Image (cartoon, rainbow, N blue to C red):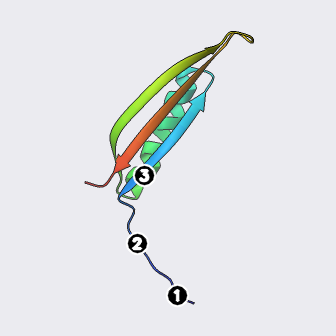
Amino acid sequence: MQIKLERIEDKVEFFEALTLKDLESKVNEKIEQNQAILLNVHSVSHQSHIDYESGKTYFTAVVHFKTK
């Protein structure tokens, strides 16, 4: 059995929520977790979408993490 340890240099994560506050909470939690493995936020992109049939608004975000 062989174990290889490689450092993660780039990571992209996707998030979705029904409220902006929940989305922000999810992103902040993940930022803290990724800082523990020495990844910092490189860029953030977000959007909102309204489902006209149900009347719900969906919020999404994409966060790109990179090493320094």
- Number of residues whose C-alpha sits closer than 10 Å to that of mark 3, classed few (under 14), some (14–19) or many (20 or more): some
Residue visible at 37% across and 54% down in the picture: 10
Q: Going by the image, does 61 lie left or right of 56?
A: left
SS class of the residue under badge 1? loop
Mark pair 1, 3: CA separation: 24 Å
Outermost residue, bottom direction?
Answer: 1
User: Which residue was labeled with disc 2?
Assistant: 6
N-terminal of the two: label 1 or label 3? 1
User: Quadrant of residue 23 in the image?
Assistant: top right
Task: Tell which of 41 and 46 is nearer to you.
Answer: 46
User: Which residue was labeled with disc 1?
Assistant: 2
Amino acid on which the number 1 mark rests in the picture: Gln
Residue visible at 68% across and 9% down in the picture: 52
Amino acid on which the number 3 mark rests in the picture: Lys
Mark pair 2, 1: CA separation: 13 Å
User: Which residue was labeled with disc 3?
Assistant: 11
N-terminal of the two: label 2 or label 3? 2
Amino acid on which the number 2 mark rests in the picture: Glu
Q: Which corner quadrant holds the N terminus?
A: bottom right
* Rendering coords of residue 5 (x, y %): 43, 76
* Rendering coords of residue 24 (x, y %): 49, 29
Outermost residue, right direction?
Answer: 54
Mark pair 2, 3: CA separation: 13 Å
Q: Which corner quadrant holds the C terminus?
A: bottom left
SS class of the residue under badge 3? strand
